[in-house]
Every structure is written in C-alpha cells, then in structure tokens.
Amino acid sequence: MLDNRLEVAVDTLKKSGVRITPQRHAVLEFLLTSKTHPTADEIYKALEGKFPNMSVATVYNNLRILRELGLVRELTYGDDSSRFDSNMMDHYHIICDDCGKIVDFHYPTLDEIESLAEKVSGFEISHHRMELYGKCGNCAQTKIQ
Ligand SMILES: [Zn+2]
Ligand SMILES: [Zn+2]
C-alpha cells in the first residue's frame, strides 16, 4: 500500500520534471507513513539524523513543492504551525483538545451543505472544512486516573 503510494508520488514528481533529491524523497516517504499530520518542524526533527546538512528551510521548500503538485495538503490553524497531510482523499479531522493529536475521519462529503450555503448566501462555494474536537483515548484515560 505504502510502496504503491510512494511509487505513484515519485512518478508524479518525475512527470513534473521535479528533481528527486534524497531529502525530497525522505520528506515524501515520512509524510506517507505518518498518520500524525506533522508540522514542518516535526518532519525536520525526524529527518535531521539522516540528513545532518538539511535545514528547516529545505523541509519547507520541499513541502511547498509537494503541495503545489497536489501530493500533500497543508492544514492551517490560524497560527504559524501548519500541519501536513498526505491523505488527499476527502476527509475530516478529529482534533484532541489536550495533546493536539489529529486523526482522519472518513464520512461522506457533505456536498449538500455547499449547495445550501450557495442558495442562502449567493456565494460561490469552493470547499468546506470541518473539524471535530474532543479528547483522544489516551488523554481521556489520563483524566480518570
Ligand atoms: Zn490527546
Ligand atoms: Zn488527514
């Protein structure tokens, strides 16, 4: 499953004429295996052992290229700690209030909400996003003890 997604992604890079540097490959692979929606900083920390010469700017630069090619999406939360998600299928997120953990939540896309919003507001709606908040299993358990 991962091999296939990685292969497809590498293929997309090749077709776009983007050079596949070892760092770029590592950032991509890390995102595809990670289910935690990491920040650029977390990606940097995870890979700096492998690439001592790599800078945070390199990670940002690679993330920008991957985003522009539609291989990852950037999740912004109003501060400067964007998170990155390699799951490009439509999905929602559940976020832990305590530890900030983000988990994918698959649910049929609420398309009707967009057409209703258009009708009501006269806007041309391009997309919507929904987040659900609560406590993850770990944090809920810690509270009980
Ligand atoms: Zn939590
Ligand atoms: Zn996600």
Image (spheres, grey):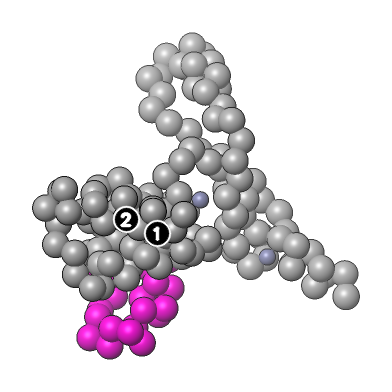
Left/right placement of residue 19 relative to residue 145 reads: left
Q: Position of residue 7 (x, y in %)?
A: 32, 55
Q: Position of residue 1 (x, y in %)?
A: 46, 54
Mark 2 residue type:
Glu
Left/right placement of residue 52 relative to residue 105 reads: left
Left/right placement of residue 106 relative to residue 127 reads: right
Q: Decide if residue 52 is in sight here.
A: yes
> Residue at coordinates 22% horizontally, 64% vertically from top-left?
61
Crowding around mark 2 (Cα neighbors within 10 Å: few <14, some 14 to 19, many 20+) is few
Q: Decide if residue 131 is in sight here.
A: no
Q: Position of residue 97 (x, y in %)?
A: 66, 60
Q: Are marks 2 and 1 in contact (CB under 8 Å)?
A: yes
Which label is found at residue 76?
Answer: none
Which label is found at residue 7?
Answer: 2
Tally of marks: 2
Give the CA separation, mark 2 to mark 1: 6 Å
Q: Quadrant of residue 54?
A: bottom left
Can you say whether 8 is above or below 32 in the image? above
Which image quarter is the C terminus in? bottom right
Say which of 68 and 16 sits in front.
16
> Residue at coordinates 80% horizontally, 72% vertically from top-left?
142
Which residue bears the numbered disc 1? 3
Q: Secondary structure at mark 2?
A: helix
Q: Secondary structure at mark 1?
A: helix
Q: Is residue 58 magenta?
A: yes
> Residue at coordinates 28% horizontally, 67% vertically from top-left?
25
Q: What range is drawn magenta here?
A: 39-59
